[in-house]
Amino acid sequence: MKRPEDYVNKSVMDMPFSGIRKFFDVASEMEGVISLGVGEPDFDTPWAIRERAIYTLEKGRTVYTSNAGLLELRQEICKYIKRNLGVEYTPKTDVLVTVGGSEAVDAAMRTVAGPGDEVLVVEPSYVCYKPCVTLTGATPVVINTTAEYDFRLQPEQILEKITDKTKAMIVCYPNNPTGAVMEYDDWAKIAAALKDKDILIISDEIYSELTYTGNKHVSPVQFPELKDKTILINGFSKSFAMTGWRLGFALGPEAIIKQMTKVHQYVIMCAPTLSQRAAVEGLRVCDGEVEKMRRQYEMRRRVMRRGFLDMGLECFEALGAFYLFPCIKSTGLSSEEFCQRLLFEEKVAVVPGNAFGEAGEGFIRCSYAYSIEDIKKALVKITAFVEKLKSEKR
Amino acid sequence: MKRDILEILENDSRKTVDDIALMLGKPADEVAAAIAEMEADNVICGYSTLINWESVKDDMVTAMIEVKVTPKRDMGFDHMAKRIYNFPEVKSVFLMSGGYDLLVMIEGKNLKEVSSFVSTKLSALDSVLSTATHFVLKRYKEHGVIFDKGSDADERMIVSP
């Protein structure tokens, strides 16, 4: 007689729970925890967007949209990409509106990869990439970026891992969890290295609005030789503070988007109508709000980084997203030990770097999607903890 | 940098020079110098605290008074504005476009005090043609700050990917 768990697909059974989840279970049961563990903005969704959603509800405009998403929204997305990246996409054929960036990652992966294929996963990275590859029957092949290069992807690392089976590579810059960015020169080197290679880039650019380099975000699609080999994924969660609205999108060559739309059509039908209508307003009028939030993050980033440097922890200058990734190797603890002790002894929650892949071992992810006051409070406690560790070592 | 400093101080005038320097990634002495310069130039005219007085005491009324005046030759409205803003009861004075000329905001202990100010002082001024007094019943938002925020709790999960 089969037990219930015997019915579970083996590849799902073998899939580990996210390292973040384990940590969350512990932290959420404690009282009075100060958290730097959240991967979402602390700002409310801009009012213009919320107001549009209210209006949409009042009007009762809540029926399905076309599978690929409201044409009006796809048009606005193409304009948005044009004004930010200077790259042209055709609304009718090159855009798919999805349920958050996550669904776009999953749909892209299912559309591209299958049993026997290899997909390069650049780590440390957001937790869903490897499982999404595994579910297609393909094999994830990890590329570990390092602090030595500020966690920027190096062309040699890709070339080393490419085999006949390599189908695609998934990257995320600005990066969660490291806060690393790829600038123009970084992508130019990769464009040159991949010139004669048949490899599709799945570029998750969900943090594209949050860069502090002084220049705008750079995407591989800005390189003509990469544009037709790239699926660009973005969304509204981080830039527009719309995490709970679950709205993202994918842009790419017509031939791929068409097939992705099939996957999306059978699995999802369409992204939430209310969110889509609200997002149209966001893309039309909220550039200023988005910039305002970016500037707030930038100030917080400086305050937090100074705090870690003053503690004597190495902390490379992360120029994107809303995370810092200080190195805790000097304390002699592993990432998990550090985070657990910090949680139990000082009641501060940060996320162990190894939750984002082996390359994150020895680091902790600290989010600055918090007010400066909260960040300062947390820094005081982390400083006390690091001092305690130092005196233990002596 | 000056604009950034102003934005920070407008939002929270208790931020110290060191805080601001850290937030902007600039040396503290440069920030201090910029603030001193803006104070001297009357760009920064003062530092105040935004208070919801209604939640502290109930015996205070605020009135917005629309004032129509005859502008003085060669001096326009500025002369009349000065005559009005020098009264300590007057909190703000604005020159307006539209149906009246000056908008005067005054605060008083009670209705009687405000109306007595209007009738004995404001209306009594030579060039004041007419006034219309509107009392504030409730304050919802001032200087970009919503007074009744409801629950301000962080609803986010403690840890999320």
Image (cartoon, coloured by chain):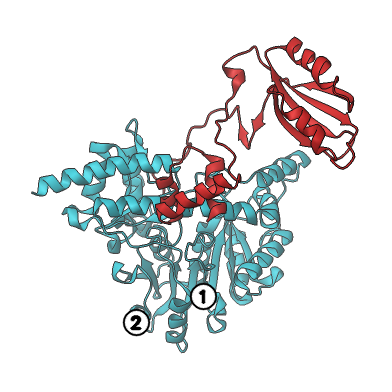
Chain colours: A cyan, B red
Q: Residues within 10 Å of mark 2 (few under 14, many from 20)?
A: few
Residue lying at 33% horizontally and 62% vertically, measured from the top left: A316
A290 relative position to A192: left or right: right
Label 2's element? Answer: helix
Amino acid beneath label 1: Pro
B62 relative position to B58: left or right: right
Q: Residues within 10 Å of mark 1 (few under 14, many from 20)?
A: many
Residue lying at 53% horizontally and 28% vertically, measured from the top left: B151
Whether residue B104 is visible: no
Q: Name the image quarter holding residue A15.
A: bottom left
Report x, y in % for residue A49. 67, 47
Alpha carbon distance from label 1 to label 2 = 17 Å
Sequence-wise, the earlier of marks 1 and 2 is: 2
Label 2 marks which chain's residue? A
Task: Out of A253 and A337, give the one closest to the viewer.
Answer: A337
Q: Which residue is mark 1?
A: A220
Amino acid beneath label 2: Glu
Task: Out of A48 and B55, give the one closest to the viewer.
Answer: B55
Label 1 marks which chain's residue? A
- State the residue lying farthest toward the bottom: A196
Residue lying at 40% horizontally and 75% vertically, measured from the top left: A117
* Residue A156, numbered label: 2
Task: Out of B55 and B122, give the one closest to the viewer.
Answer: B122
Report x, y in % for residue A269. 63, 56
- State the residue lying farthest toward the top: B112
